[in-house]
Amino acid sequence: MDRGVSVVVGEENEEESPLEQLVAGVIMALVFLVGFGLLALGNPWFWIAFPVGFAGVLPAAMALVRLYESRQREEAEATDETEDALATLRRRYATGELSEEAFEQKVERLLETETVADARKVTDSRREVRDDEAVEFEHS
């Protein structure tokens, strides 16, 4: 029997970010300040501050911090993808794979589409324009 190995199912190995630690510390300090402040003032309902603060405000604040951080990561990844694509275009132009006109066209298309959804919209609109031009050509 191996006693040195233990497996915990469902446990995440993520550590809290500095922003999460800061927000948690501030929220806890405020909850204690409000709760004990109400106790010092003689309010019999002082204890309400603790469940509201620790079971309501703290989890909500942590969820907002995680949402904010995930959006920041997504934006950074999207920027990295754009920079990688731009670097690839520059390399292909430098090696002669792309003409100057093709390079400029691809750079323009890359810069006007920030997300995959934007790229699909641009592609669909260009496809519709081409289809309309083909229909007009057939009628003439």
Image (spheres, rainbow, N blue to C red):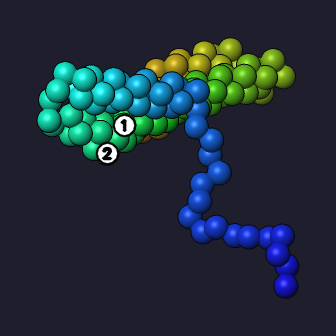
Coordinates of residue 126 in the picture (x, y in percent)? 39, 32
Residue lying farthest left?
44
Coordinates of residue 140 in the picture (x, y in percent): 27, 34
Instruction: Name the image quarter holding the N terminus.
Output: bottom right
Circle 1 SS class: helix
Residue with the mark numbered 2: 55
Instruction: Name the residue nearer the viewer: 131 or 127.
Output: 127
Left or right for 63, reference 35: right
Instruction: Depth check: give the residue in front, 127 or 67.
Output: 67
Q: Name the kind of residue labelled 1 in the image.
A: Leu
Tell me where residue 100 sits by quadrant.
Answer: top right
Q: Which residue is mark 1?
A: 58
What's the residue at 51%, 24% (across, down)? 22
The x, y position of residue 120, in whole percent, is: 42, 39
Mark 1: give few (<14), some (14-19) or many (20+) Cα within 10 Å. Answer: many
Q: Where residue 59 sits in the image (x, y, percent)?
A: 37, 41
Q: CA distance from mark 1 to mark 2?
A: 7 Å
Residue 76 is labelled as none
Assess whether mark 2 and mark 1 are in contact (beta carbons under 8 angstroms).
yes
Residue 92 seen by the camera = yes
Q: Three-letter amino acid code at disc 2?
A: Ala
Which residue appears at 34% of the width and 41% of the height? Answer: 54
